[in-house]
Amino acid sequence: SLSGRLQNVFSKLRGKGKVSEEDVNEAMREVRLALLEADVNFKVVKDFVSKVKEKSIGKEVMNSFTPGMVIIDIVNKELTELMGGSQAKLAKSNKPPTVIMMAGLQGAGKTTTSAKLAKLLQKGNHRPLLVAADIYRPAAIKQLQVLGEQIKAPVFSLGDQTSPVEIARQAVQHAKDNGLDYVIIDTAGRLHIDEELMEELKQIHSVVSPDEVLLVVDAMTGQDAVNVADSFNKQLALTGVVLTKLDGDSRGGAALSVKAVTGCPIKFAALGEKIDALEPFHPERMASRILGMGDMLSLIEKAQSNIDTEKAKEMERKMRNAEFTFDDFLEQMDQVKKLGPIDQILEMLPGMNKAKGMKDLKVDDKQMGRVEAIVHSMTKNEKQQPEIINHNRRKRIATGSGTSVAEVNRLIKQFDEMRKMMKQFSGMMGGGGKGAKNA
Ligand code: GDP
Ligand code: MG
């Protein structure tokens, strides 16, 4: 996957001081390939790579960071920029109704998305009207009516004998008359872009002057989706794009190229066939998802401001050499506590939610108290060499800490998991742990 590939790239970069040209070139060679493989537009990749290079080379590498981390940070920010920087909101007319025209090729997901969007608007206490302006495709009207019923949104239809332009015009009037504040016009599509289709869309556009023209494109079609968006945009001033079928195994290329190629922001992402599978598109979240980093970058920033760097360095060295003991564990817990609630911190670490054994590790602060009690009941030797903690010792520790043998067992098991994972984590961050390869 794109994120897997990118993580591998960054794990290779070590060293200190400044980010060297060599570091950047090595990383960007791989990033370039990963992006091309994900079907990102060639020119977009080229511009992206040169931008990241320009910003990375010569950058200072701070304490306990690696060049890989510095470059990830820049790549993450640039990916976000590439997709428009911040979330592009849906327009709202100050003279209701707000008119939204949906456009796109056949099968892209216009009708489904119209209903999903109506549902989102309803959640925001709006009263949307769905308009059946696809009179050509058999059962298109019926499809919208069924969806409308499902979400209890009114559907405006004049059958298939009235022109779509007239339907759209009357629908807007109907919304005004009935206090409906959004009008969503579901238009017809074709298999390919043709004159007739464009002509009809332009006519609807000139009659209703929509506040939004949303182009619905299928993310699975990769660069084709981007080409379609480009052609539509040249003929019909688009205000936004909806990327559908992101739940499928699309390679992410469309999401990354659309804005750069068309200048049109992605406003929504559809992630399934269900009626509530539509969400506002957040470039920064998509970038993190692509990098597979969770919220690691904000964690790093937080850690940097809170954690004693000298101690952190020593800890890092121990993790790398698998010398991590229960004493370190206690100290680590102290450090971690300074960062905030532990479950939130774990969530921010990449791969943590997926990691084996981590699912049942529900840590809250009260539980941390019990964990600390267990560790405090260990002898000096036990803390330094957890391997020696046999059954009798476990019983003694349980009694001493006022917990149970089961709890002690669980902690020791989790400690082992954690050791493994820290090794993997430090490997991914450029520490050289063997786990890096499967990260
Ligand atoms: P239209 O021709 O543009 O109106 O497309 P439709 O709304 O009729 O959708 C075509 C097909 O794509 C339908 O089977 C939808 O259920 C499906 N579809 C639409 N959006 C999504 C999505 O986000 N994910 C998945 N998996 N299927 C989708
Ligand atoms: Mg349709």
Image (cartoon, grey):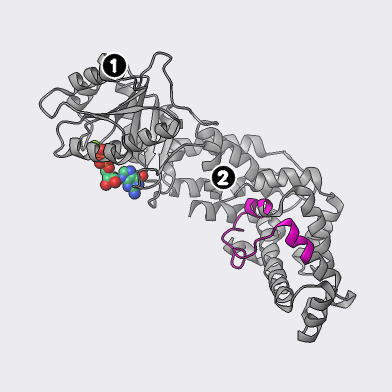
* Residue 359 higher or lower than 93, as above or below: below
SS state under label 1: helix
Horizontal side, residue 102 vs residue 314: left or right:
left
**What's drawn in magenta, residue-wise?**
344-370
Q: Quadrant of residue 372?
A: bottom right
Looking at the image, is 267 positioned above or below residue 424?
above
Membership of 249 in magenta stretch = no
| Percent coordinates x, y for residue 367 in the rendering | 73, 62
Instruction: Indicate left or right for 350 with 242 as reference.
Output: right
Kindly identify the residue that appears in the image at 62 percent across and 46 percent down.
295
Residue for badge 1:
177
Quarter of image, ligand 1: top left
- Residue under pointer 2: 288
The residue located at (45%, 46%) in the rendering is 36
Residue type at the position of mark 1: Asp
Which residue is at the front of the view, 322 or 71?
Answer: 322
In the orientation shown, which residue stands out farthest toward the left? 161
Does the magenta-highlighted stretch encompass residue 354?
A: yes
Q: Residues within 10 Å of mark 1 (few under 14, many from 20)?
A: few
* Residue 223 versus residue 248 in the image, above or below: above
Q: Position of residue 286 (x, y in %)?
A: 51, 42
Task: Name the one closer to the observer, 233 or 244.
Answer: 244
- The residue located at (85%, 50%) in the rendering is 308
Identify residue type, mark 2: Ser
Residue extending furthest bottom? 392
Dot 2, crowdedness within 10 Å: few (<14), some or many (≥20)?
Answer: many
Q: Are marks 1 and 2 in contact (CB under 8 Å)?
A: no
Q: Measured from the top left, where is residue 104 in percent x and y?
A: 28, 33
Q: Residue furthest right?
A: 380
- Distance from disc 1 to disc 2, alpha carbons, whole Å, reads 45 Å
